Amino acid sequence: MRNTFVIFKKEAGSYFNSAVAYFNIIAYLAVSAWLFFWLGFFFERKQTEMTYFFSLMPWLFLFFIPAMTMRLWAEEKKMGTVEILMTLPIRSHEVVLGKFLASFLVLVLMIILSFPLPLALNSLGNPDNGQIFTSYLGLILVGAAYIAIGLCASTFTSDQVIAFVVGIIASFAMLVIGFVPWLRDFGLSYHFNSITRGVVDSRDLIYYFSVIGFFLYLSVLSVESKRWR
């Protein structure tokens, strides 16, 4: 785990030593607040609930998450540092996990900093805080799945734009599958909607952990295939 922590520190530092993390966090908070108060007609509806807000977040994350992950491997390849990284006494899964956790940290910070929204609701009325809590949990799980997908996309190319587009397409596909009746159990949206109802089902957790694990495993395979070329 020490090597994983070293990679995590390196990647987290690259996020916060540049404008990437700050831009994503500020842009997300601004857009999510706009969606909540204005597009969601919060003042007109006069309801202390966040159902509409959470229904939009997976679609918003489709753009924010790939924008974070597109650089994780593509930049290494473009700068030529991936060759140095691959010669170090470090395993591929440690590198992949370290990069994943660094992006996950930024995701969690984005979500935590949006907590003034439910706090404002509690000052105005009596919202269902249990449902809000589980919805935030679902949002974290969706975001983590997007990170794993985007990270995997980034391992296949040195072009960040291509990694960004592939990340969006793959995440979108995994999301909309949930709207197809006979495939819904494989879709991110179906399990997210299940969690946002206020009940955390073990099947939903197993699904998300499986998706995250699957795409991280694909990332490891992709990295390993390039290591031995």
Image (cartoon, grey):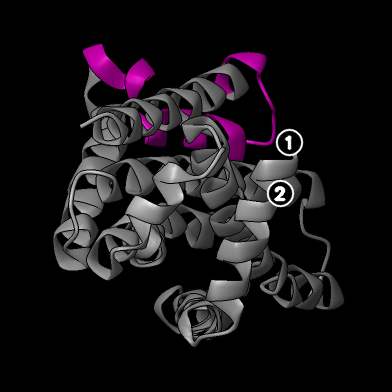
**Magenta-colored span:** 182-204
Looking at the image, do the residues carrying marks 1 and 2 touch, with CB atoms under 8 Å apart? yes
Disc 1: which residue: 1
Q: Name which residue lies at 74% across and 68% down.
A: 118
Q: Name which residue lies at 83% across and 70% down.
A: 122
Q: Is residue 81 left or right of residue 25?
A: left
Q: Which numbered circle lies on residue 5?
A: 2
Tell me where residue 213 appears, x and y as whole percent. 49, 25
The mark tally for this picture is 2
Q: Is residue 33 above or below residue 59?
A: below
Q: Is residue 191 magenta?
A: yes
Answer with the quarter of the image where residue 125 lies. bottom right
Tell me where residue 82 appears, x and y as whole percent. 35, 54
Q: Quadrant of the C terminus?
A: top left
Q: Is residue 183 left or right of residue 218?
A: left
Amino acid type of the residue that numbered disc 2 sits on in the rendered structure = Phe
